[in-house]
Amino acid sequence: MFSRRGQGTTEYLIILAIVIVIALVVVGVLGGFGSQGSAINASQSRSYWGTVQPLAVTDWLISQTGTGSSLVFKNLTANTITLTDLNWNGAAINITDVNISAGATATVTSTSMTCGSNTGQNFSRTFSYTYNTADLTGLKVYGSSPIVGSCQ
């Protein structure tokens, strides 16, 4: 009377569809956890910026309002470098040129560098700087890691 010849194929396709749906759900759930590990902490940020050539940023204090915000730069080269401009979270920060001798440190302060958070909360800001050497001007260093810390 009725042929049961296609029943096995139909059952196979239904089971395959269920397996694919389950796999998509699992991938979706696991995909939501992937971005949580991409942020860096303050220690990793200090480690990165403390070795950036030619001017390492060895310390920073960033306040909510910008008052007292400062960055400490260390010249890691054998020549004098002139720090000319900063870029804090996409905003240009004009500074008076700072000459930093070989191996020396210099502290740069600016009220334009704010953490945008409440005191005690963590912040993460992109940062870059522009400098001159005896032979070249307008050299830029773009950090591949943000400056991370606790808002003061």
Image: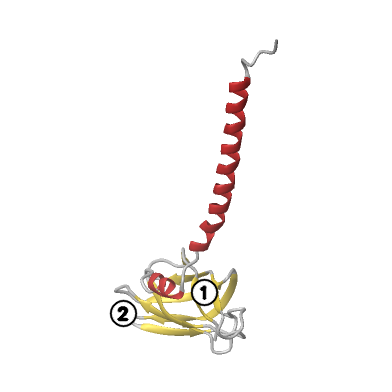
Q: Residue at x 37, y 68 (%)?
A: 53
With 126 as the anchor, is 47 left or right in this view? left
**Residue 38 seen in this snapshot:** no
Q: Quarter of the image holding residue 19?
A: top right
Q: Are marks 1 and 2 in contact (CB under 8 Å)?
A: no
The three-letter code of the residue at mark 1 reads Asp
Toward the right, the furthest residue is 1
User: Which residue is most to the front?
Assistant: 1
Residue 118: x and y, percent?
61, 83
If you read the primary sequence from the N terminus, does the residue marked by circle 1 or circle 2 appear first?
1
Q: Residues within 10 Å of mark 1 (few under 14, many from 20)?
A: many
Quadrant the N terminus occupies = top right
**Relative depth, front residue between 23 and 73:** 23
Residue extending farthest left: 78
Residue holding disc 2:
103
Q: Could you say where residue 33 lies in the image, as x and y percent from the top left?
A: 53, 58
Q: Taking 124 as reference, is 59 left or right? A: left
Q: Amino acid at mark 2?
A: Gly
Nearest the viewer among 26 and 33 is 26
Q: Quadrant of residue 98?
A: bottom left
Q: Position of residue 107 (x, y in %)?
A: 44, 85
How far apart in space, not on screen, are marks 1 and 2 (Cα)? 20 Å
In this rendering, the answer to whether 66 lies above or below 8 is below
Mark 2 surroundings: few (<14), some (14-19) or many (≥20) residues within 10 A: few
Residue 96 vertical position relative to residue 36 in the rendered view, above or below: below
Q: Which quadrant of the structure image shows residue 74?
A: bottom left
Residue 111 placement (x, y as % from top left)? 59, 85
Q: Is residue 30 left or right of residue 82?
A: right
Q: Which residue is the site of mark 1? A: 85
Residue drawn at (34%, 80%) of the image = 101
Rendered residue at 38%/67% (across/down): 135
**Relative to residue 27, is residue 42 depicted above or below?**
below
